[in-house]
Image (spheres, rainbow, N blue to C red):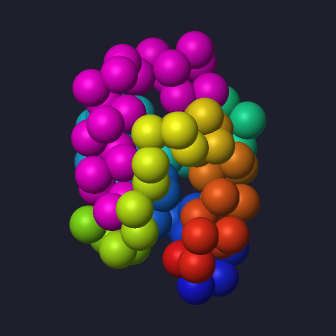
């Protein structure tokens, strides 16, 4: 997948679990919990959605590596998305 495809997949999953968010207004450095106000259950749901969509396992120890869209794209590229 290209970087743009991975970013779109991440933002699609994010807005699916947090429908009040607008993908067009989410910045690459926006922190999921601090800036976008997701809670721990939202993060778990996001990880599940990414797993379903990309068929990648994201272990809990790696959750900080998907804390912003930019970090998530890099992590997902490295993981083979």
- In the rendering, at what x and y percent does residue 37 appear? 45, 16
Q: In the image, is 62 to the left or to the right of 53?
A: right
Image point (65%, 82%), residue name: 2
Image quadrant where one finds the N terminus: bottom right
Q: Is residue 69 visible?
A: no
Image point (35%, 74%), residue name: 55
Depth order, front residue of 55/10: 55
Q: Is residue 27 above or below residue 54?
A: above
Q: Is residue 79 above or below residue 47?
A: below
Depth order, front residue of 9/59: 59
The span shown in magenta is 31-51
Q: Quadrant of residue 6?
A: bottom right
- In the rendering, at what x and y percent does residue 16 appear? 27, 48
Image point (36%, 18%), residue name: 39
- In the rendering, at what x and y percent does residue 49 appear? 28, 55
- In the rendering, at what x and y percent does residue 52 appear? 26, 66
Image point (53%, 28%), residue name: 32
**Number of marks in the image?**
0
Q: In the image, is 41 to the left or to the right of 60?
A: left
Depth order, front residue of 65/39: 65
In magenta stretch: residue 44 = yes
Q: In the image, is 15 to the left or to the right of 74?
A: left
Q: Is residue 67 visible?
A: yes
């Amino acid at each position: 997948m290209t970087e743009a495809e991975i970013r779109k997949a991440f933002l699609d999953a994010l807005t699916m679990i947090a429908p009040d968010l607008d993908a067009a207004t989410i910045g690459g450095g926006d922190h999921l919990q601090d800036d976008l106000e997701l809670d721990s259950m939202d993060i778990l749901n996001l990880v599940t959605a990414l797993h379903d969509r990309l068929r990648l396992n994201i272990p809990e120890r790696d959750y900080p590596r998907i804390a912003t869209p930019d970090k998530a794209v890099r992590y997902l590229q490295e993981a083979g998305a």
